[in-house]
Image: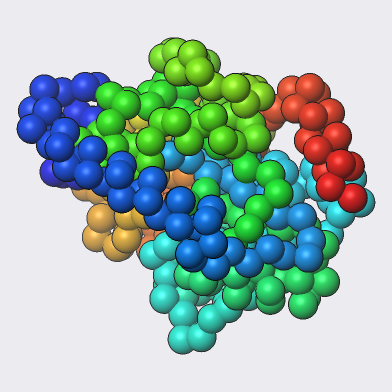
Amino acid sequence: MTLAQCWLKGAYQGSRWLWPLKPLGALYQWGMARREQAYRNGKKQVWQAPVPVIVVGNITLGGTGKSPLVAWLASWLVAQGWSPGIVSRGYGGKAAHYPLLVTPDTEVAESGDEPLMLAQQTGLPVVADPKRVRGVQALIKAGCDIILSDDGLQHLALGRDIELLVIDGARGLGNGRCLPAGPLRESKRRLQRVDAVIVNGQVERPLPASVPAAVTTMQLAPRCWRRLEDGARFPLAPLPFTLPVHAVAGIGHPERFFRTLAGLGVNGDWHPLADHQQFSAEALNFTDSRPVIMTAKDAVKCYALAPPNSWVLDVEATLPPEFEHWLAARLSALS
């Protein structure tokens, strides 16, 4: 386990060795509050797009399921007659020029893993740009009439019409403290100012009692197995590969992926890696010939690296009809 993984585990489990960092956490929280206030009172400029903007984000480090929700929203919006575009920072990528229009064939080194994954999953316009406003302007120019901002809650220079905050039901808000004393990017009071809180999975840690926003539950449901080398898809059962396996996960919460595999009857060795892990052929070259199983987010970095017997578990978000009705009403009110 790396130092970063050890810290993240301690932040969510409330380890006492993080207590000396509480003053730094309070200072970080104060700085984030001042930054937000600067945008609210006009000292920092906010650009408001001429089309609706839906921001999907979180206030915790580590994966919560934002990108699957963005993919679900994109599909739902298309079904409602919208022409959505997706903007992302493009973490882990470095392009020669921005904004970068991400296509299914874009090099992951340019786009980053999440934008490329979303481009492949949705088939919609996806733009990666560290300057979100510039990226949104490019999407509007391309004909998009509604914008989804992936992981954009803290990017306050971009105005937004709807904020959706995703929380991992298993880990909740951890010890409830801000960085570096805990996993929070900003104060948990931020939950009071978003439009909806979406809990990914079963709620195992209660939310703060003061949360006034609409709360709904999202499930990530396995959809199919995908063979990495040729993209062929297979049903979840029977398993299209032999057991045991090597399962790798370079995502924010690898344990969620491993629990899903176990629930599908998969066993073997689990290999949790850092979020946005940079893979190499050597890292995937295990001493035996077991199948290698990975997430869709990791797969976009491994097409040229993974051994032939490599598989992807594709998942999709599912949300209750009540959330669809709520979202439709909010969008209707914007027109």
Give above or below for 243 relative to 233.
above
Residue 146 against residue 246 in the figure, above or below = below
User: In the picture, residue 291 is in which quadrant?
Assistant: top left
Is residue 157 visible in the rendered image? The answer is no
Where residue 93 appears, x then y in whole percent?
42, 70
x%, y% of residue 163?
Answer: 62, 42
The answer to which image quadrant residue 323 occupies is top right
Of all residues shown, which one is farthest toward the bottom?
Answer: 96
- The residue drawn where x is 29% and y is 37% is 178
Kindly tell me whether residue 109 is visible in this rendering: yes
Q: In the figure, is residue 332 to the left or right of 169? A: right
Colour scheme of the rendered structure: rainbow
Q: How many marks?
A: 0
From the top left corner, tell me how far across and down residue 289 is, in percent.
Answer: 32, 45
Judged left or right of residue 241, residue 164 is: right
Residue at image x 68%, y 76%? Answer: 138
The correct choice, above or below, for 335 with respect to 168 in the image is below
Q: Residue at x 41, y 31 (%)?
A: 188
Residue appearing at x 80%, y 24% in the figure:
321
Q: Nearer the viewer, residue 199 or 194?
A: 194
The N terminus lies in which quarter of the figure? top left
Q: Is residue 223 left or right of residue 157?
A: right
Residue 225 point in image, percent of width and height? 58, 39
Left or right, residue 239 beside residue 112: right
